[in-house]
Image (cartoon, rainbow, N blue to C red):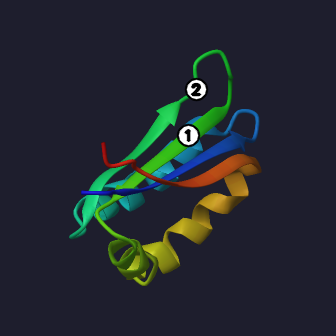
């Protein structure tokens, strides 16, 4: 099976990492409970203070589209934007079938 993966690195504003993580906690829990979600995690990036990496793994593009239409995506995610200084990088990845 080929999974769809989203990988985004954010630079969080100085002194706001804990607030950002707290504001994302419900988003993470609700996303992880969605049908079609394989993984939804926030990660610290080694040796890069204030950088947070979001990794999402979805079973299909359809599952990701359903996620984007959930109430928590539409209401919780915008509340986190004030803590983000910049998006460092963002990629959509498809797993090779070997």
Decide if residue 44 is on the left or right side of residue 50: left
Label 2 packing within 10 angstroms: few (<14), some (14-19), many (20+):
few
Q: Name the one closer to the observer, 70 or 17.
A: 70
Image point 42% across, 79% down: which residue?
65
> Quadrant location of residue 11?
top right
Image quadrant containing the N terminus: bottom left
User: Residue at label 2?
Assistant: 45
Image quadrant containing the C terminus: top left
Circles 2 and 1 in contact, beta carbons < 8 Å: yes
Image point 75% across, 41% down: which residue?
13
- Upstream in the sequence, badge 2 or badge 1? 2
Q: Position of residue 75 (x, y in %)?
A: 50, 77
Decide if residue 45 is on the left or right side of residue 43: right
Q: Name the one closer to the observer, 22 or 66.
A: 66
Label 2 – label 1 distance at C-alpha: 7 Å
Image point 68% across, 22% down: which residue?
48
Q: Residue furthest front?
A: 98
Q: Which labelled disc corresponds to residue 53?
A: 1
Measured along the vertical axis of the image, is residue 67 above or below residue 83? below
Image point 42% across, 53% down: which residue?
56
Q: Position of residue 74 (x, y in %)?
A: 50, 79
Q: Name the one closer to the observer, 31 or 90.
A: 90
Q: Position of residue 47 (x, y in %)?
A: 65, 15
Q: Position of residue 50 (x, y in %)?
A: 67, 31
Q: Secondary structure at mark 2?
A: loop
Label 1 packing within 10 angstroms: few (<14), some (14-19), many (20+):
some
């Amino acid at each position: 099976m080929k999974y769809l993966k989203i990988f985004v690195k954010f630079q969080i504003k100085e002194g706001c990492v804990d607030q950002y993580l707290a504001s994302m906690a419900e988003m993470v829990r609700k996303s992880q409970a969605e049908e079609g979600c394989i993984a939804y995690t926030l990660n610290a990036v080694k040796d890069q203070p204030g950088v947070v990496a979001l990794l999402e793994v979805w079973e299909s593009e359809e599952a990701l589209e359903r996620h984007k239409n959930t109430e928590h995506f539409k209401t919780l995610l915008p509340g986190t934007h004030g803590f983000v200084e910049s998006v460092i990088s963002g990629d959509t990845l498809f797993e090779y079938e070997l």
